[in-house]
Image: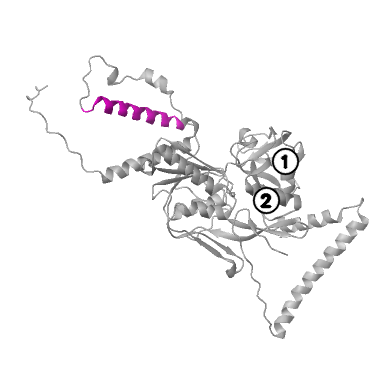
Amino acid sequence: MRKFVMVAVGGTLAGIIATTQVAGPLLAEQAKPETSVYQQLDLFGTVFERIRAQYVQPVDASKLIEAAINGMLTSLDPHSSYMDAKEYAAMQVQTKGEFGGLGIEVTMDQGYIKVVSPIDGTPAAAAGIQPGDYITKVNGATVMGMTLDQAVESMRGPVGSEIKITVVRKGTKDPFDVTLVRDTIKLTAAKGSLEGNTVVLRLTTFNDQTYDGMKAGLDKALKDAGGLDKINGVVIDLRNNPGGLLTQAIKVSDAFLNQGEIVSTRGRNPGDGERFNATPGDLINGKPIVVLINGGTASASEIVTGALQDHHRAVVIGTKSFGKGSVQTIIPIKGEGAMRLTTARYYTPSGRSIQALGISPDIVVPQEQAKVLDASKQDNQQTSESQLKGILSNDSMTDAEKKQYIAEQKAAADEAKLRDSDFQLAYAVDLLKGLAVANATATAPAPTSAPAADAAPAPAN
């Protein structure tokens, strides 16, 4: 059977099995465990036949075997599971960037569905679903006892149909219901925008479109800014990015690194490990980078964050990431289904595993709503020199220079409004502005003053 390997979070691994002939005593030692395995398989066959023959009602043998396979895989860790043909096809479509559903990335925790992150522009995001929420019921039916894929399947349905989920949220006393309308989820994997002199790259997932979308967004933002030399840096926003394809995480990291390791994977056998290195070329020629993360930043997005952080290429701000440091390999099996099997851990360039620990930001910045007065109210309450009568004129600027300076003041005030809608992003933009000022101060020549005109000494007070 042709083996097709695709990763949901981690790397593509090739397994090598070596066989050798050994002496009799070692064969005798190996025979005992093998006999035990065969006995257990015989036990499985006995139970399977008893169920088929004596269960209270007829059972579908194929469904019974699928359930047994899935039970075996889910007993390993929260991310290993079995996908039947329908689920496997849906997973393949999702990595292409368009699928039907609610728009949430989920995992299994304590028997319930835990939200890793909502996806931008989807019904889940619009309804206010948050990372860390638990979904305990779907249309009134408990998800306890379901596998992850079964729970996800229960949330799927025709586009335009309603679904009610019951949510348990930390800090909220009682569970509450949320009604959503299913929609076709078209992922915009990456987009770029300009905030003042800062380019903001928002990456929502790592699918086949991520790098190309990021590059296109960066190019457009640079064009709008008037060129690379006109910007003070780039913010890479990875908040609520649940991850995806390792190949795309490597390409995104490589886009801002000239050399060195990006990530390595280590499996059960030493020969299964892989190491991925950066190639020469930085899309922004060393301009400063700030990476934004939060609790919904997971797997492939943590790989990008870890690579840029370990190489001191970026300042990471926000809150601690999700902490998914394992690699899943998708292995097609007979019957057009596939198994999602955890095959390795991944490590950042410094050799650290973030599994269950997450990535700690360099600067912790919670998402808070800034409590500031409305700008118009501030203007009404404050008086400046320019509002006084009979003031002296400013003789250091021409009229054109004054006009430009006033425009720059207005632009700075407009940028500050971002703090009301997205405090973390505003902090990142402000940080890059500060770095630009610091760098300019360090490299600028000392200012020289014009010679003062002769003047009579001022009278003493």
* In the displayed structure image, the side of residue 319 where residue 337 appears, left or right: right
Q: Secondary structure at mark 1?
A: helix
Checking the image for residue 36, the label placed there is: none
| Chief secondary structure of the magenta portion | helix
Q: Residues within 10 Å of mark 1 (few under 14, many from 20)?
A: some
Which quadrant holds the N terminus? bottom right
Residue 398 painted magenta: yes
First-in-chain label (2 vs 1):
2
Checking the image for residue 92, the label placed there is: 2
Q: Quadrant of residue 392?
A: top left
Residue type, numbered disc 1 = Met
Disc 1 marks which residue? 155
Image: 455 above or below 107: above
Q: Secondary structure at mark 2?
A: helix
Q: Nearer the viewer, residue 391 or 24?
A: 391
Q: Is residue 338 visible?
A: yes
In three-dimensional space, the C-alpha distance between marks 2 and 1, rounded to whole angstroms, equals 18 Å
Q: Nearer the viewer, residue 6 or 59?
A: 6
Which quadrant holds the C terminus? top left
Residue 108 position in % (x across, y down)? 68, 48
Residue 4 painted magenta: no
- Residue range of the region highlighted in magenta in the rendering: 396-418
Q: Residues within 10 Å of mark 2 (few under 14, many from 20)?
A: some
* In the displayed structure image, the side of residue 434 where residue 176 appears, left or right: right
**Which of pointers 2 and 1 indicates the residue nearer the eye?**
2
* In the displayed structure image, the side of residue 202 where residue 128 appears, left or right: right
